[in-house]
Amino acid sequence: MDKNKFEVIRLKMERTANSLRRNNMFCECADNCEDALEIIRELLTEGDTICAGGSMTLAESGVMNMLKEGPYNFLDRDRPGITSEERKDIYTAAFSSDVFITSSNAITEKGELYNVDGNGNRVAAMIYGPKSVIVVAGYNKIVKDIKEAETRVKEIAAPANAIRLSCGTPCTESGKCMECMHENRICADTVIMSRQRVKERIKVILIGEALGY
Ligand code: SF4
């Protein structure tokens, strides 16, 4: 990437990081995925029980492989052959895990995390339960404010995820939110996380690469 363009992105990441810190969240910026993995490794302890939210960012950044191959008790909800009952057990186990790792649908420059879930298991674990929550996000997830976050989800994140998961919802045909009433609607629970009471329970790693939806 052009170095001047990257500098603008880096400054936006720093601005957002400062807002997240003001909201009692830990935040580090990494120029690339390799650096981000180093930061995340430092935040983990050998033997940690770790659960993860469904996320393209975690796969693309290499975090998912690191969890699978590392010295952790990683409860993999997507392991081959897993039954739906076993997956539900992992969703529940996440609430008492040491670490929950996920991405975020959007992060505002004001320091808020904006997420919309279909099942609610991801946003529930982000809010309460796991001792530590690590949020990994590419710079493309940064938006100005909640209004832009909402637009981002309706026009990018939700339709792309609905296509990925073969939901058959109207947005998989139109490429944008149609405010559906479909049984597979993936937009059921909207959560905004702003200033936190528990300092640095939420740890955000911003990466200078475009990742996920
Ligand atoms: S509400 Fe329905 S149409 Fe809109 S993004 Fe969500 S799943 Fe797609």
Image: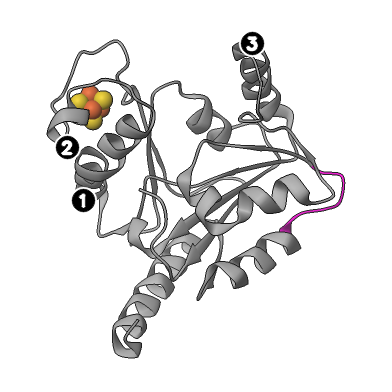
Question: Mark 1 — residue?
Answer: 148
Residue at the far front in the pictured view: 81
Specify whether residue 200 is in view: no
Image location of residue 177, percent across then percent down: 17, 32
Specify whether residue 26 is in view: yes
Q: Residues within 10 Å of mark 2 (few under 14, many from 20)?
A: some
Residue in the picture at 51% in, 54% down: 60
Ligand 1 image position (quadrant) = top left
Identify which residue, 193 or 213, lies in the foreground: 213
Q: State whether the magenta stretch is mostly helix, strand or loop.
A: loop
Q: CA distance from mark 1 to mark 2?
A: 17 Å
Does the residue at mark 3 contact the one at mark 1 (Cβ under 8 Å)? no
Type of residue at label 1? Glu
Is 169 on the left-hand or right-hand side of 44? left
Q: Earlier in the sequence, mark 3 or mark 2?
A: 3
Type of residue at label 3? Glu
Question: Mark 2 — residue?
Answer: 175
Is ligand 1 within 8 Å of the beta carbon of the residue shown at mark 2? no
Image location of residue 37, percent across then percent down: 64, 64
Specify start and end residues of the magenta stretch as a single range: 43-48
Disc tally is: 3
Residue at the far bottom in the pictured view: 4
Mark number for residue 85? 3
Q: CA distance from mark 3 to mark 2?
A: 32 Å
Q: Residues within 10 Å of mark 3 (few under 14, many from 20)?
A: few
